[in-house]
Image (tube, grey):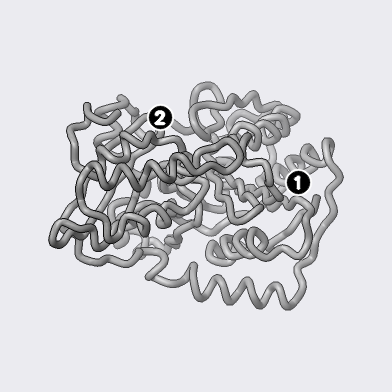
Amino acid sequence: MFVIETNTTDPALNLAYEEYYLRHAAFDDPIIMLWRNEPTVVVGAFQNTYSEVDYDYLRSHSIHLVRRTTGGGAVYHDLGNLCYSFIRLETDLDHLDFHQFLQPVQTALATLGIDAEISGRNDLLVEGRKISGSAARVVGDRVLFHGTLLYSSDLGVLVRVLTVNKEKIVSKGVPSVRSRVTRIADHLPQSLDILEFKQLLLNAFMDSETYLPYEPSEKEKRAILALAESKYRNDEWTFGKNPSFNVSYSRRFDKGELTVKLLVHHSRIEHCHFEGDYLGWLDSDEVASALVGVVYSRESVEAVLKKFEESTTGSMSRLDLYFGGLTRNGIVGTIMGEDKHQGE
């Protein structure tokens, strides 16, 4: 396994490092990256940036804003937050599971005296409060799994820049952000700065596997910088294209929120866009593209989604890979704007 040091706290560059080695690594060995960002809000791949952040506040406080390629919700990074990334070949998609990636992190934290538990879809908790969230993406035969470790971040800023969806509060009884999170540093038996913590965490990983340092070539660094400039510093990627929609519906499910926006003309779907914090492994834009040109009726929409459901990668439905386990009936019900008690 290779360890890659990005040697930067620039969020656009760090995300570009991840994507470059996910798509273009010239070797098959697994990769681990441990990295930090300057103050940054990172929105999920399928989220509506405008509804997730107070952009004027971010700009006035010199807080970066970037969009990642994985699903899930918006998160706050600063130099007191440690991010980890695992990239590896994955030909067996039957057993893709967040827990298999979280367990090594949980084990490594235990060696440092942190009793963390895996909770829900993708979280690590200490004493019932969140210290880590995670997300993943599959590209070809490679998988990226990455997450945050809330070590000593400024929780006051975190609370200010992250807001909980009102529907989620009503439907789940979700408490405030501040009461739901805690910092790893506050639970360690010894006092460590974050760089010491980073090294001890890496040492803990190395107890179970052999890790070799990998130095990116100059050619790779140029390609990574170009990707950061063309994508992660590009407002079109960060904020998304915003064509006119005349149909928009949202639903919250146990496995995440789904919003669908449609442009329907003469009873046919001319444009389709999915948003939400669902944890898809694949890009749901492919499903949206398949709905373009389809008659806007439950029967027609369901027929398209059924094809994705019946198409499998291994024994796993591709619809599950796109929408992180949201059901076909639930997705169709959202697209058609049905009452939330229908199509569950």
Q: Which one is in front, 321 or 277?
A: 321
Residue 200 point in image, percent of width and height = 76, 41
Check disc 2 and report the residue beneath it.
Answer: 179
Circle 1 SS class:
helix
Q: Where is residue 188 in the image (x, y as percent from the top left)?
A: 66, 30
* 91 in relation to 42, above or below: above
Rendering coords of residue 171 (x, y %): 27, 27
Numbered label attached to residue 214: none
Q: Which of 262 and 159 is in front in this view?
A: 262
Dot 1 corresponds to which residue? 199
How far across and how far down the image is residue 225, in percent? Answer: 60, 74
Q: Residue furthest left?
A: 266
Q: Which amino acid does label 1 sit on?
A: Gln
Residue situated in front as seen by the camera: 15 or 34? 15
Residue at x 35%, y 48% (from the top left corner): 304
Q: Which of 161 and 196 is in front in this view?
A: 161
Q: Which amino acid does label 2 sit on?
A: Ser
Q: Is mark 2 on a helix, strand or loop?
A: helix
